[in-house]
Image (spheres, rainbow, N blue to C red):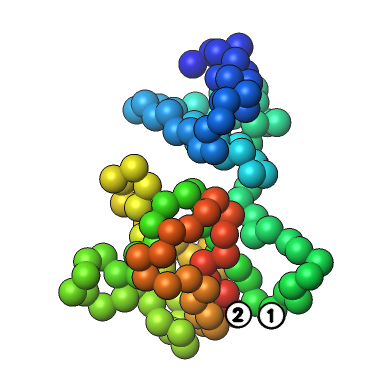
Amino acid sequence: MELEQLLTLIQTVSDSKLTEFKYETETLCVKMGKESSVKVVTADPQMMAAVPAASAAVEAPDTEEEKAPEGKIVASPLVGTFYAAPSEDAAPYVQVGDAVKKGQVLAIVEAMKLMNEIESEYDGIVEEILVENAQGVEYGQPLFRIR
């Protein structure tokens, strides 16, 4: 995908009523969400250097009304359905009080029939699970608090 095509795609999605868009090939994965960021991931480093403005990190939303509890927040990278376990009869990936390592699977978010593993971005202890199993989640919504 050329830079002009990517910029046109970003503009088209921005102008549409879509809240999320994903395009994937063997060497390129483009995910866009309208709330606060666009994320571009690619295997071609030259492409990443060409579009730094299109790349952004997922962060938990801040509000003045809520006090920020201690710990780090793991937020949902996409809109979908949150699942705490790999199947209905399986134990949850993690529970409050469990020690976790960076990269460890915490849950799954199903989006468009695809199961997306949510990995911990931090080492620490699961202080709080902020959503219920099988609950719908939004892009950027806090899922876990880890201290």
Of residues 123 and 118, the one nearer the viewer is: 118
Whether residue 39 can be seen here: no
What's under tag 1, amino acid-wise? Glu
Secondary structure found at label 1: loop
Mark 1 crowd level (few <14, some 14–19, many ≥20, 10 Å Cα): few
Quick one: quadrant of the C terminus? bottom right
Note whether residue 71 is visible: yes
The single residue placed furthest to the right in the displayed view is 64
Residue drawn 58% across and 54% down?
Answer: 140
Give the residue at x 31% y 46%.
Answer: 114
Query: Between disc 2 and disc 1, whose residue precedes?
Result: 1
Q: Residue 9 falls in which quadrant of the image?
A: top right
Q: Is residue 18 left or right of residue 107?
A: right
Q: CA distance from mark 2 to mark 1?
A: 7 Å
Q: Nearer the viewer, residue 46 or 109?
A: 109
Which label sits on residue 2? none
Q: Is residue 49 left or right of residue 131?
A: right
Which disc is residue 70 wearing?
A: 1
Can you give x and y, in whole percent of width and height, for residue 124 in the image?
54, 78
Looking at the picture, which amino acid does disc 2 mark?
Arg
Relative depth, front residue between 124 and 34:
34
Q: How many marks?
A: 2
Residue 101 spot, x, y in % from top left: 46, 72
Residue behind mark 2 = 147
Where residue 12 appears, as percent x and y from the top left, is 58, 20
CB atoms of marks 2 and 1 within 8 Å: yes
